Image (cartoon, helix red, strand yellow):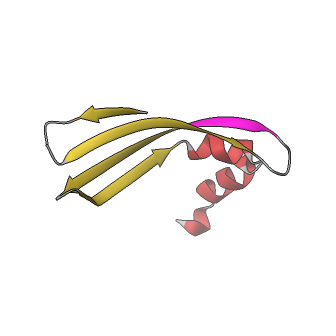
C-alpha cells in the first residue's frame, strides 16, 4: 500500500492492489484501487473508493451487461 499526503492535513490518499479468484471460472485477477479519506479526531469521517469497474466486469464475464446498461437510453 502507498499512502500520499495532501495539502489538507485531514485528507490522505491510499493506493493498493488486491488479488482475487472468480469462483465460477477459477480465474485469478489483480485490481488496483484508490481511496481518498478525510480523517478527523482519529476517525475516518468521509471516504471515496475508486477501482476499475470495467476490468472487474470483464473478469467476471459481465462486461457486455455493463456496456448494455451504460448505453441503454431508457436508463438515462
Question: How far from the left and from the top, in percent, is residue 63?
Answer: 71, 47
* Residue displayed at 66% across by 50% down: 67
Q: Is 61 left, or right, of 9 in this rendering?
A: right
Q: Residue 55, position in %: x, y? A: 63, 40
Residue sitting at x 85%, y 51%: 24
Q: Main secondary structure of the magenta part?
A: strand
Quarter of the picture containing the N terminus is top left
**Most extreme residue toward the front, as rendered?**
42
Q: Is residue 7 left or right of residue 66?
A: left
Is residue 28 rendered magenta in the image? yes
Does residue 25 belong to the magenta stretch? no
Give x and y (percent) for residue 19.
64, 38
Tally the numbered discs: 0
User: Residue at the right extreme?
Assistant: 25
**Quadrant of residue 47 within the rendered picture:** bottom left
Image x and y of residue 61, in percent: 78, 47
Residue drawn at 80 percent across, 39 percent down: 27
Residue numbers of the magenta segment? 27-31
Residue pictured at 81% horizontal, 50% vertical: 23
* Residue 57 placement, left or right of 37: right
Amino acid at each position: 500500500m502507498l499512502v500520499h499526503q495532501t495539502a489538507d492535513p485531514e485528507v490522505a490518499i491510499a493506493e493498493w492492489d488486491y488479488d482475487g479468484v472468480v469462483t465460477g471460472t477459477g480465474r485469478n485477477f489483480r485490481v488496483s484501487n484508490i481511496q481518498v479519506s478525510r480523517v478527523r479526531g482519529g476517525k475516518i469521517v468521509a471516504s471515496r473508493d475508486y477501482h476499475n469497474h470495467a476490468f472487474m466486469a470483464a473478469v467476471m464475464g459481465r462486461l457486455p451487461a455493463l456496456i448494455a446498461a451504460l448505453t441503454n437510453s431508457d436508463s438515462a
